[in-house]
Image: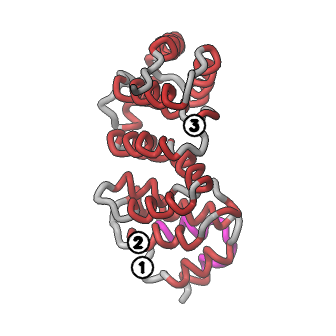
Amino acid sequence: MEDSADHALISALREALGKRADPVRAAGAQAYMKSSLPSLGVRVPEVRHIAASAARDFPPASAGQLQATVLELWRSSGFREERYAAIDLTAHRLVAGDLAMLPVYEEIIRTGAWWDYADGVAGRLCGLLLAHPREMSAVLRRWSRDPQLWIRRAAITSQLKAKKATDTALLAAVIEPNMADPEFFIRKAIGWALREYAKTDPEWVSVFVARHSGELSPLSTKEALRRIAGVGQQLRTR
């Protein structure tokens, strides 16, 4: 028998979000996100705090119940912040590094189909990769060639928080199939992933960009080299 969602937790979370609604900010947020899903106008840090408080007040009985609660909240959300809260609930220690959460993250990315949702679970994918490198490396390599751009973006940004634990072979493997993609969100993701890793190993990033100087878009190149003094100018003058 599958675990059931904790509707008391969901109700408490929705009530707390509603109390902090800001109609003026909501209109601006919905326009900014170019979304048909309404916004409550609650700031992201507040949403995160509300989700954490709700999880403390109504502690999940199991990882399965937490997963069911996340999916119920995600699927029934009437406001964007409710979806953010669903993602925030996945930070709970019960599901940290739990490979069974992968289908949840994939559903969020595929059905959310926008950058804030894909980026919202990037850190969770990183946690799964560090805990299950063999399985997740295969998944992310497959995702990097997926027809849906948000799945590919998630593969590219999955190691943003890995720092010294970054698998550079995997990083290259998920970027290279996407270098020719004209989509802004893919090109930006490539630059972002490289820029973050440049904080740890600027030489690796410099060599990678130089090796692919005729394939990476100007946007990806600019973002990748933003924190590497002198390298960008050297490439531009070649």
| Residue 95 tag number | 3
- Residues marked 2 and 1 touching at CB (< 8 Å): yes
Amino acid type of disc 2? Met
The furthest residue to the bottom: 238
Which mark sits nearer the N-terminus, 2 or 1?
2
At horizontal 57% and vertical 60% (from top left) the residue drawn is: 133
Identity of the residue drawn at 60% across and 67% down: 167
> Quick one: SS at disc 3?
helix
Residue plotted at (45% across, 60% down): 140
**What is the quadrant of the N terminus in the image?**
top left
Residue 65 marker: none
* x, y percent for residue 221: 51, 71
Percent coordinates x, y for residue 223 in the rendering:
55, 64
Name the dominant secondary structure of the magenta segment: helix
Residue 215: mark in rendering: 1
Q: Residue 201, position in %: x, y?
A: 69, 70
Q: Quadrant of residue 130?
A: bottom right
Say if the magenta span includes residue 223.
yes
Q: Which residues are magenta?
A: 218-233
Mark 2 or mark 3: which is in front? 3
Residue of label 2: 179
Q: CA distance from mark 2 to mark 3?
A: 33 Å
Q: Which residue type carries mark 1?
A: Glu
